[in-house]
Image (spheres, rainbow, N blue to C red):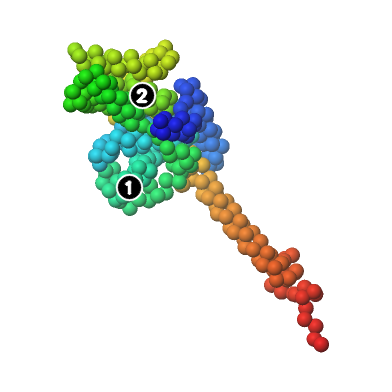
Amino acid sequence: MASINSWLTSSHKTRWILGDQELEKRRAACYEKSLGEIERYKPESASTSAADNLAVAVSLEEQKQLLSYYEKTLSKICSLFRMPRKILAISIVYLKRFYLKFTVLDHEPWRIMVTCVYLACKVENAYLAAEELAKGVQQDARVVEKIVLGSEMTLLQGLDFDLVVHTPYASLRGFLYELENCCQFEGWDPDRAETLSSALRKRANKSLDALLFSDAPLTFSPGILAYAALQVAAKKMEGEDKQMVESFFGHCRSKAGNTEKLAEFVKKVHKLGARGSASLADEGVLKEIDRKVKLCRNPVYDPTSDQYKKQQAEKQAQKLRAKANLKRSAAASDARALGLTEIAENPDSKRRKSSPTNRVVAG
């Protein structure tokens, strides 16, 4: 019950489960914002016009293709380090959430991908040193360390600091535990029930892996995803195993209440699973998309652009002003406490004149 309550009140459910239309709306809004900033802050001295620059900008469809590539690259990294599936799921969900607020024109996906793995490991108390992560991505350790430390705050801000992710793998374990109990209630031997559960888990995990590469984690609860994956896994069951699983599904549907809505959700999940299983775009296509991203970076977030440097200089100036104001405020407060009225009224003054009421008159 505690697990159910934690889901119902979690930021995952309340802020990050979105409809298809809402997903597309957010992505389109971010894309238009990025193009607008590219056009607005285009340097006047650039050799190409803003219109020419926008002409090479990646499309939303190309962005999806590129992010799909990085999601599967992320999966390979997690497999290389034999990370739990939970860390894989959290990393991919972080990547998906981040690019609902930004586009690949704003932040380079490779940097964000590596930082997602790094952050997911920290969240799950499975700390992975930057030096080890560098081996997985075949980069210099100092470069990777600089990237993850420099991008971590950017990632956190993109996630709105919502780090809680409920994975479907946990929900699947719950379903299978209940299935084993049902089997034993029907008189099955515990070992036989465990064998059935193990076979279903192996097949269902593959279905869940495919769903991670689709929009399913952003549109459906982990329980729905796990239930749909279990249905796919059960299709190859035969004889008494099949009968037992069908009986268990009937039990689940009776608890769900609205069976028609459940069936509708599961049907949509199966379609998303098919998309997640689809092969990536050709290598040549992906290289061309990556080339276009490099040619059309958003100056607001590009450290090499004049606009970015100007913004950083303004932020630094604001920090210095705030620090100076705080220092003057503290000096004025101290002066008032000591009765030094002139300094209290003008903390920058070097003269320290005592208040007439505090003067010592010689007798």
Circle nearer the N terminus (1, 2): 1
* Amino acid identity at mark 1: Tyr
Query: Do the residues bearing badges 1 and 2 touch, measured as CB atoms within 8 Å?
Result: no
Quadrant assignment, res 57: top left
Query: The N terminus appears in which quarter of the rendering?
Result: top left
Quadrant assignment, res 248: top left
**What is the count of numbered marks?**
2
Quadrant assignment, res 266: top left
Q: Position of residue 50 (x, y in %)?
A: 52, 34
The answer, for residue 227, to whether it is visible in the render is yes
Q: Residues within 10 Å of mark 1 (few under 14, many from 20)?
A: few
* Amino acid identity at mark 2: Leu
Query: The C terminus appears in which quarter of the rendering?
Result: bottom right
Q: Nearer the viewer, residue 82 or 191?
A: 191
Q: Quick one: SS at disc 1? A: loop
Which residue is located at x 54 percent, y 36 percent? Answer: 37
Which residue is located at x 48 percent, y 32 percent? Answer: 9
Q: Position of residue 293 (x, y in %)?
A: 41, 35
Which residue is located at x 50 percent, y 24 percent? Answer: 22
Which residue is located at x 29 percent, y 34 percent? Answer: 85
Q: Nearer the viewer, residue 62 or 185?
A: 185
For mark 1, what is the residue?
A: 127
**Which of the numbered marks, if any, corresponds to residue 15?**
none
Q: Is residue 176 above or below residue 129?
A: above
For mark 2, what is the residue?
A: 225
